[in-house]
Amino acid sequence: MKSRKHIIYSTVLTVVVNIVPMLIFKSKLPLEVPIHWDMNGNVNGSLPQTLFVYGTPIVMGLINLVVCYKYGSKFSKDIKLYYIIPVVCFLITILMLYLALK
């Protein structure tokens, strides 16, 4: 039961810490947010702004949920492991926002 609590907390934390910066910078984002570039730095993939802002944190939360359930037995020995994914996802969000606003 203790691990279930940490799975829920880390998943909610993942969504919240990733949606907050998205909402802060939403007005500065283009309507089509670039998400993929080729070897020459040309954009070859984009998402609509709304999907980028709201969808990305939800997908990150789902990834956290799947990983925590799959590897939860290994995480239960060290509770800090449940919270690695929220931190990594936050760093990825900051990088994505930086590249989208560049």
Image (tube, helix red, strand yellow):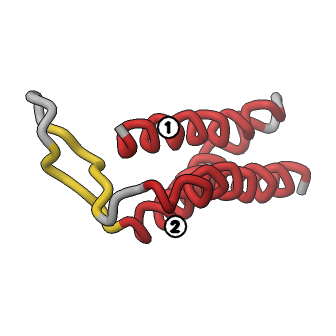
Q: Residue at x 29, y 48 (%)?
A: 35
Report how many numbered discs are placed on residues in the image. 2
Q: Quadrant of the C terminus?
A: top left
**Element at label 1:** helix
Residue type at mark 1?
Ile
Q: For residue 30, which quarter of the picture?
A: bottom left
Residue 62 showing in the rendered view: yes
Category of crowding for the residue at label 2, using alpha-carbon neighbours closer than 10 angstroms: few (below 14), some (14–19), many (at least 20): some
Residue lying farthest to the left in this orientation? 40
Category of crowding for the residue at label 1, using alpha-carbon neighbours closer than 10 angstroms: few (below 14), some (14–19), many (at least 20): some
- Rendered location of residue 8, percent (x, y): 77, 59
Circle 2 residue: 54
Rendered position, 96 above or below 19 = above
- Rendered location of residue 75, percent (x, y): 74, 36
Q: Nearer the viewer, residue 102 or 3?
A: 102
Residue type at mark 2?
Tyr
Q: Residue at x 75, y 49 (%)?
A: 10
- Rendered location of residue 32, percent (x, y): 28, 62
Q: Nearer the viewer, residue 23 or 90?
A: 23
- Residue 60 is left or right of residue 10, and the answer is left
- Residue 101 is left or right of residue 73, and the answer is left
CA gap between label 1 and label 2 equals: 15 Å
- Residue 66 is left or right of residue 28, and the answer is right
Circle 1 residue: 92
Residue lying farthest to the right in this orientation? 2
Q: Residue at x 36, y 45 (%)?
A: 100
**Element at label 2:** helix
Residue 69 showing in the rendered view: no
Residue lying farthest to the front in this orientation? 28
Rendered position, 25 above or below 75 = below
- Rendered location of residue 20, percent (x, y): 66, 55
Q: Residue at x 73, y 40 (%)?
A: 82
